[in-house]
Image (cartoon, coloured by chain):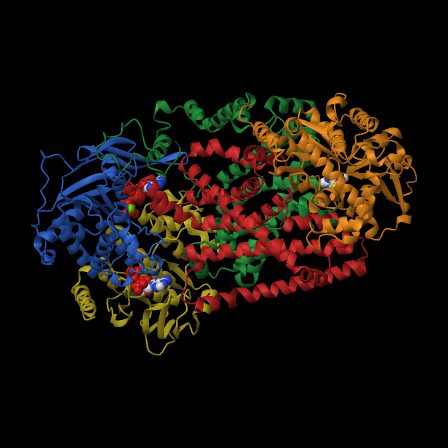
Chain colours: A blue, B yellow, C red, D orange, E green
Amino acid sequence: MPVPPTGTAMPEIQLKDVEMRYPTGNTEVLALHQVSMDIAKGEFVSLLGPSGCGKTTLLRLMADLLEPTTGSITVAGESARAARLARKYGIVFQSPVLYDWRKVRHNVALPLEMMNVPKKEREERAMALLELVGLQRFADKYPWQLSGGMQQRAAIARALAMEPEILLMDEPFSALDEFSRERLNEELLSIWSKVQNTIVFVTHSIPESIFLSDRVFVLSPHPGRLSAVVDIPLPRPRTPEMRNSPLFFELIARIRDSFEGV
Amino acid sequence: MPVPPTGTAMPEIQLKDVEMRYPTGNTEVLALHQVSMDIAKGEFVSLLGPSGCGKTTLLRLMADLLEPTTGSITVAGESARAARLARKYGIVFQSPVLYDWRKVRHNVALPLEMMNVPKKEREERAMALLELVGLQRFADKYPWQLSGGMQQRAAIARALAMEPEILLMDEPFSALDEFSRERLNEELLSIWSKVQNTIVFVTHSIPESIFLSDRVFVLSPHPGRLSAVVDIPLPRPRTPEMRNSPLFFELIARIRDSFEGV
Amino acid sequence: MRAGTLFMRHRLVPVLVWVAVILVLWEAGSWALLNLAGVPLAQSKLPYVHAIVTTSVQYSGTLLKEGSATFGNAAIGFIIGAAAGVLLAILMSVSRWIERLTFPYAIASQMIPILGLAPIIYGIVRDEYISRIIISGYITFFPVALNMLRGLRSVEPSALELMYSYAAKPWSVYWKLRLPAALPSLFSGLKIAAPLAVTGAILVELMGAQHGIGVIMLRNLYYGPSHVYMFWSTVIVGALLGILSYWVISLIERLASPWQPEFRTRGGER
Amino acid sequence: GCGSSSNENTSAAGQTGSAEASTEPVTVKLQLKWVPQAQFAGYYVALDKGYYKDEGLNVEILPGGPDIVPEQQVAGGSADIGVDWVASLLTSQEQEMPLVQIAQIFQKSGLVLISKKSAHIQSPADLKGKKVGNWMGGNEFEVLALFDKYKLDPNKDLSFTKQGFTMDQFLNGELDAASAMTYNEYQVAIESGVKADDMNVIDMNKEGVAMLEDNLFANSEWLANNKETAAKFVRASLKGWQDAINDPEGAVDIVMKQAESGSTTKEHQLKMMQEVAKLILPEGFDKAKMGYTDGTMFKQTADIALQFGVIKQASDTQKAYTNEIMDMATQSK
Amino acid sequence: MENRYPNAPSATEASNHSAPPDPPALPSAYRSSSQSASQARSDPRHSPFLRMLVNSSSIWLPLLAGVLFLLLWQLEVFHHILDLKKYQLPLPSAIANAMLDNWSMLLSYTGYTLTEAVLGMLCGSALGFVIALIATAWPRWGGASLIVVATMNAVPIVALAPVMNLWFGDGIGSRVAIVTVTTMAAMAINAYKGMTSVHPLALDLMHSYAASRIDTFRYLRIQNSLPHVFTALKINATASMIGAIVGEFFFSSQGLGYLLSNSIKVAKMPLGWSCIVLAAIAGVIFYLIVERLEKVFIRWHSSQRI
Ligand SMILES: Nc1ncnc2c1ncn2[C@@H]1O[C@H](COP(=O)(O)OP(=O)(O)OP(=O)(O)O)[C@@H](O)[C@H]1O
Ligand SMILES: Nc1ncnc2c1ncn2[C@@H]1O[C@H](COP(=O)(O)OP(=O)(O)OP(=O)(O)O)[C@@H](O)[C@H]1O
Ligand SMILES: Cc1ncc(C[n+]2csc(CCO)c2C)c(N)n1
Ligand SMILES: [Mg+2]
Ligand SMILES: [Mg+2]
């Protein structure tokens, strides 16, 4: 069971007054303004917010793929950079980013290859993960021979392959149908409860964020900033039936309100 | 008001026993098996189905971007090819496909440029459409300076720019948050009621397909085939309140059932 | 099997037709130049194809022997030049500083013609065979380096970020991402360089080699218009070596990077 | 310079010095000015008939070409002995290349200016206003001297342009007068259908502006320790030349072995051999003097070179050439 | 340090779990870009002056290296190490002297050769581009034209020179023709790759507009080929110079190539090398101009994003 966030324990991911400006020609885009947040170790949080509000930016900052213009980001007490160098991150990007020259299973095995996992083991792991996302039949195809949703599933399998301490997922399921999506939601939770890693999950679906998370961070745009943090007091393990519970609907309404309050 | 499908009028899009096999190395992938459907002129239909069932393939076949292995496709009595050459199609692909070297507004104006619309007019149209999708502030940015959802919105604006007789949309709103999505759903319907074009809309969201369509085609995978066609008897114009009507929920359940029956 | 025949039917027939058309036009042009225009040295300007063919057949033994000697030298020069080009490109892609430092000099070095370079190379290595190989490598390396550098630099930002998120060592970034991604560009460079290597080998043969197409090319030029057909035969042999090298590289490209959009099998031809 | 190649050569030569008595063959590399042809028949004959071997030498003949400067090769140690024109040797010597002439094979100049009768160039004075070609790069000084003799300024009175190593420019009328070697380009013109009667020929020897051409020169550092070897080489080479002059057909057969079939014809090489023979043993020339450097002709060559800025300082003829090797070669016969 | 992407996370990365965290003052190559650019105005350390200095490092660094190189050369260090003689590689001072002595001639010859190179390169690149267009537009029948060009690329200048001399005379035309032939292939092959390696969906988009072949080129293929085209132009900038120079060896009576070959044959190595030096300077400038143009024309390309 993940530890609920407490004020005392050292947060796994901590942002302090983070501001991000993208230089574009002679002007700048203020993508994030004064964002501060703490995410506890083993916590599952979601980022919700309208398109262009800075969710991807925030994720990239946490992953040390960008550096904040001002403010600081610490991961387990160290810099985000140190965490990245320690290979703590697994990332699912908003687009699949598969390597064209690798077959699907070699794409999935890529992070394992980078960590020098023996060939046999990583092949097995890759195949198991492909089965999890329902792509075992397509293991020997090239990425461009897959449908959009299948590519995204391959990318998810790839991120899960390395069992990262911190899993950053940018709208991983948005290209999937509801059934696949719900199934993968449950799979993700079951993996998470086993591995006990920290997950930051970007989504546009309020029910999805509620079903998965301990807390939901709501962002608002122009400039991107944190407008609300909603605790999800649903018990763990979560079951599909919870989706129909009154609490669930109440939470949906609450988050929707915090949205509209923007 | 769109004309509901009748058995007598000539269908705008007609597929007869369409079969699609992709050659892959030495084997073949059977992507679509014996698909037949009629879509009336001015009709709004949705394609629903799990990931990899052949929705994109079907759309590409209708657009004459692929040729069926067997079977025939006619559009307004002619071949799909003739329809394409007559520039009847506007397409929103599953990924945005914006040209890196064009600013956002020039990307949106691209189809107008190709149809020799005068510069002033197309600039105005592009800006109006960008406003519609909420990107007016980003008109002068390059595509890679936009967020994922913003890129997709630009692609939607581009497809709307040419007011096509047949609009094919492949999961256009999947990268968008619920609010943007619902707003754009309504905008799309209002445009459609004005232009009276035929729309084929791929989505994973059952509510979305119901809210928008006259009919919902449900596809099932392995191999992709048509498993159900659901009429949506909701009156036009559709209003947001309808989403909470009992009929709406009933339709959701019916489609879900037809899904599960697969 | 099927791909093979497909390849043949799609590629070979047009090439053959082209060759036929060019040869007929050439022959006609030659005839016109000789009989209608009445310009001096008409046969030197555009000799009869049939005469070249006859000469080539007559001396096919020599041409074959010298041609293969040249091709062998070209191959060695090409491999060395290509390797050097790839290496330089990798070095320059590692850091813009290295590029800034080495690139102007790489360009400048290309401006030293063999005539000026030869004494230096001879002076340094003191072995004519090695010098010749170095020189023909020197001719081929530049296009490879530039194309490879472009390829290494044009990697998709997001693909790079993936590597970055794995804290990939530079070595892995190259091995698993940049190099495969640069293959299409590299092959463009190699396609330019391969025929150039033949040029280089011929050029190098003018520096006192005993054998090679270049040697007979030179002699036939030198001994005058009575040797035009033989001279043109050597030119044709050189050109054929160029085709051969180009074709070999294209074939390797298909095998080494089949994922490229050009090579993908598509459902339904457009 | 420590560890320089010349030193390597010296040490190698030191060994050969002691080895000269033994049976171990000494390697000598000869760098030609141009491609293998009858112009160099003597060396090929000597090689083919084993004259070098008889002297205990293992001779390697390196072909030349348009991009080969024999002086560079010999000075740099790629070859031990080279063949070039005297004027080129003088310029190289002025650049402090360690080179010394050890024999003069051609006693006369083979350079002529040819023109079609239609160009009306009866005498050199008629060159005024004409387009005259030469290969340049060290081959042009005789022609410049000719212009000078007739008070023609090559920059004003006529157009003195570069001629390629083909005769095309002459044949298609691009050049009014072209440079030609009696033994090659002149023959090429004739073989291409220009009749000898249709050509005017200006002979540098007759005009008194001749310079010495094909010689033998050696790397002086190498020579210092290999005089005996050089003498053997020259002796065998002269023997080869004599054979070649006596039996041109046989010599050409040997030369033809060096030429890939189709790259030249036996007829052409035979013509070349005959013309070359006239340069080596001009009419009335003392056969015993074959190979010796004629002091006055050398001086004339050096003077012309100085006059035209080929060299900046008068050549020290004492250092530029030596007949010592020739003496050794002829005496110890 | 203006690299945007982590094309090479430093060698210590990933292996230093236990190593102390990097000092924050030392940003990785990756981030310095977004940072330095975005902070340019807000951070006083990034004054325009400082930035100019940093940017101009791209000039003074190679320059410094060049000066060092010249120094080692002048002090005969290279000659010593490689056992070269001054008549094989003359000293910079001798080259400079030869250059001063023949300055006006060298200048006019440089102009002459550069004219040939630029004209030939423009013709060759244009032709190569057209060939790529044809090969892309009609892959089946036009594809062979690529092979024809590649074939001509295998004909050496020694063979080209006499033929072009026959066809175009011994004036500037024959060298322009030589350079044209030698620069065609690089452009044709690269432009072809650029035009054919378009994203399949981008092509589909054009098809959906029923774009004519011409439109597909105008709106998609040509832009997509630009990065490749510029690579070809860079190759050709140098290839054209060397083509013109070598072309001049054989028939020309002017130009750097003519002077170079003459000088080397009469052992005037310093004069020969002053030709090489001028050719190198002209070639580098030519190249840099093309590179500047590239920066202007394909700002959008991922290899150019700041
Ligand atoms: N490379 C860039 N250059 C300039 N501006 C950028 C860049 N990347 C993102 N932006 C801007 O930053 C803002 C936030 O973008 P971000 O991608 O973080 O949004 P998002 O919340 O992920 O949106 P979506 O849900 O649509 O993916 C947007 O306004 C976008 O235009
Ligand atoms: N170019 C191709 N080559 C080979 N197989 C392909 C190709 N494109 C698609 N397929 C296969 O065809 C099937 C249908 O793909 P399609 O893209 O139509 O699915 P989809 O319904 O759009 O799925 P999604 O919702 O995930 O986008 C899949 O099994 C896919 O692997
Ligand atoms: C580039 C070039 N240089 C010189 C000659 C002329 N040539 C060739 S061999 C020879 C005699 C040498 O002993 C001469 C003068 C040429 N044809 N081409
Ligand atoms: Mg995003
Ligand atoms: Mg799809």
| Residue D265 seen | yes
Left or right side of C168 for D146: right
Image quarter where the C terminus of chain B lies is bottom left
Percent from the top left, x then y, of residue A100?
A: 36, 54
Residue appearing at x 26%, y 48% in the figure? A111
Image quarter where the N terminus of chain B lies is bottom left
Look at the picture and state if D100 lies above or below A155. above
Q: Nearer the viewer, residue C145 or D224?
A: D224
Left or right side of C238 for D245: right
| Residue E259 seen | no
Left or right side of B103 for E88: right
Give the residue furthest to the bottom. B8
Percent from the top left, x then y, of residue A101?
A: 37, 54
Q: Nearer the viewer, residue D280 or B135?
A: D280
Left or right side of B15 for E70: right
Percent from the top left, x then y, of residue A17?
A: 22, 32
Q: Nearer the viewer, residue B95 or E183?
A: E183
Percent from the top left, x then y, of residue B217?
A: 28, 69
Rendered image quadrant of residue D6: top right
Look at the picture and state if B149 lies above or below D92. below
Task: Tally the marks.
Answer: 0
Rendered image quadrant of residue B84: bottom left
Look at the picture and state if B218 lies above or below B173. below
Q: Nearer the viewer, residue C144 or B246?
A: C144
